[in-house]
């Protein structure tokens, strides 16, 4: 019986320490035994365990009933091989892929209980990479217990993305019956994720609108200063090239709007929606322009004076719109090639936009 126990101990030491076993002969004799659920005793050194884990250090320093009794640390509730892998990591700071695949969840629990952060981080990362719809609920519960926020978030995102398959698993049914608070937590996360998705979509649509308005402002200045295709200032010869403008995708539309605005009979009475749109573009330009005396855009100076009289510039919503459009212009300039970007940024610096 004693011989078989010695063989088991020697085998466990070899499995735990691996390549380090030869070097461990230089260390003192093991002075502590780690007891596993299967009854296996793994010899270890208290100094090594204490340096790796403050929890194990407090267990080792706990007073014994009899000085002659041997020190035994019981690590129960997990497979013997998982405990061996855990002790092996304490000695070597290494863990094989095979051990992580087989005992990653157990090692995560052990590293959390005994405060071994390096092993905990590696296990959380590895377990997160092996998530499936079948095990994600169990791993989520473990992530909560082990305070592993990154793993928790991965689990929540996978459940949100594949909710129907996860809902049909046995783990989900068990969780519903035994942990309704976790179910509520998951459903709240899914609702919040959907709200974030809608908010992001709305923000993108708003940003697209601001970008379009920014381009419309540049296009308006381009038409009123340089002239393009069929519309331009009276002192500039019409363009010989009648092809669509290559500078701005909105140029043709703005030209049509200007033509309509110049000839529409209903704009005076305010009954034309296209003319209202043109008025808004002209007022927006006036709010952004700081060169009213030399600006070639029609009604720029008049709109500035009118807004000042009507205190249009004090409207918080209007100020916000102007800031958003100016910001969109800066962003669009950053997406240009380097030389064009420098010119655009220089132009923005010279023309400090004021409300």
Image (cartoon, rainbow, N blue to C red):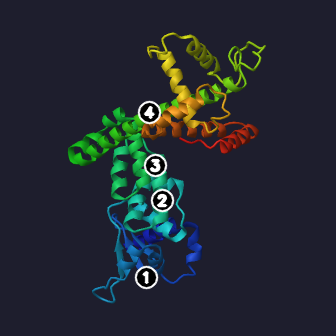
Q: Looking at the picture, how far across and down is residue 259, in whole percent?
A: 60, 13
Q: Give 203 or 344, whichever is nearer the viewer.
A: 344
Determine which of the numbered discs, if any, sits on residue 7 in the image.
none
Q: Looking at the picture, how far across and down is residue 65, in whole percent?
A: 27, 86
Residues marked 1 and 3 touching at CB (< 8 Å): no
Residues marked 4 and 2 touching at CB (< 8 Å): no
Q: Give 115 or 256, whichever is nearer the viewer.
A: 256
Q: Which of marks 1 and 2 is nearer the N terminus?
A: 1
Front tag of 4 and 2: 4
Residue at the extreme bottom: 67
Residues marked 4 and 1 touching at CB (< 8 Å): no
Instruction: Please name the residue that numbered disc 4 is placed on.
Output: 202
- Asked if residue 133 can be seen in this view, the reply is no
Q: Which of marks 1 and 3 is nearer the N terminus?
A: 1
For label 3, the crowd category at 10 Å Cα-Cα, with few meaning under 14, some 14 to 19 and many 20 or more, is many
Tell me the distance, in whole angstroms, between the alpha carbons under discs 4 and 1. Answer: 65 Å
Instruction: Please name the residue that numbered disc 2 is placed on.
Output: 121
Instruction: Please name the residue that numbered disc 1 is placed on.
Output: 31
């Amino acid at each position: 019986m004693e011989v078989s126990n010695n063989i088991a101990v020697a085998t466990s030491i070899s499995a735990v320490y691996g390549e380090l076993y030869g070097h461990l002969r230089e260390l003192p004799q093991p002075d502590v035994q780690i007891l596993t659920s299967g009854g296996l005793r793994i010899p270890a050194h208290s100094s090594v365990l204490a340096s790796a884990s403050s929890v194990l250090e407090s267990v080792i320093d706990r007073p014994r009933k009899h000085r002659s009794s041997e020190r035994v640390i019981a690590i129960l509730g997990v497979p013997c091989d998982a405990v061996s892998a855990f002790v092996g990591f304490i000695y070597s700071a290494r863990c094989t892929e095979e051990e992580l695949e087989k005992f990653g969840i157990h090692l995560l629990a052990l590293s959390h209980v005994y405060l071994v952060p390096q092993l905990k981080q590696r296990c959380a990362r590895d377990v997160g990479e092996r998530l499936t719809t079948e095990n994600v609920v169990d791993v989520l519960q473990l992530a909560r217990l082990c305070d592993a926020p990154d793993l928790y978030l991965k689990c929540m995102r996978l459940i949100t993305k594949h909710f129907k398959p996860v809902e049909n698993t046995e783990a989900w049914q068990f969780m519903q019956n035994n942990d309704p608070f976790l179910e509520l937590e998951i459903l709240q996360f899914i609702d919040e994720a959907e709200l974030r998705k809608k908010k992001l979509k709305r923000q993108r649509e708003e940003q697209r609108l601001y970008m379009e308005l920014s381009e419309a402002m540049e296009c308006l200045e381009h038409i009123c200063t340089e002239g393009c295709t069929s519309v331009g200032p009276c002192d500039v010869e019409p363009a010989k090239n009648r092809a669509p403008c290559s500078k701005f995708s909105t140029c043709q539309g703005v030209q049509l709007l200007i033509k309509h605005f110049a000839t529409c009979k209903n704009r005076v009475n305010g009954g034309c929606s296209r003319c209202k749109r043109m008025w808004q573009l002209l007022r927006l330009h006036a709010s952004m322009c700081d060169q009213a005396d030399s600006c070639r855009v029609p009604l720029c100076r008049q709109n500035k004076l009118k807004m000042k009289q009507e205190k249009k510039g004090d409207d918080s919503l209007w100020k916000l719109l102007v800031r958003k459009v100016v910001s969109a212009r800066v962003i669009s300039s950053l997406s240009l090639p380097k030389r064009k970007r420098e010119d655009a940024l220089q132009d923005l610096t010279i023309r400090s936009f004021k409300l």
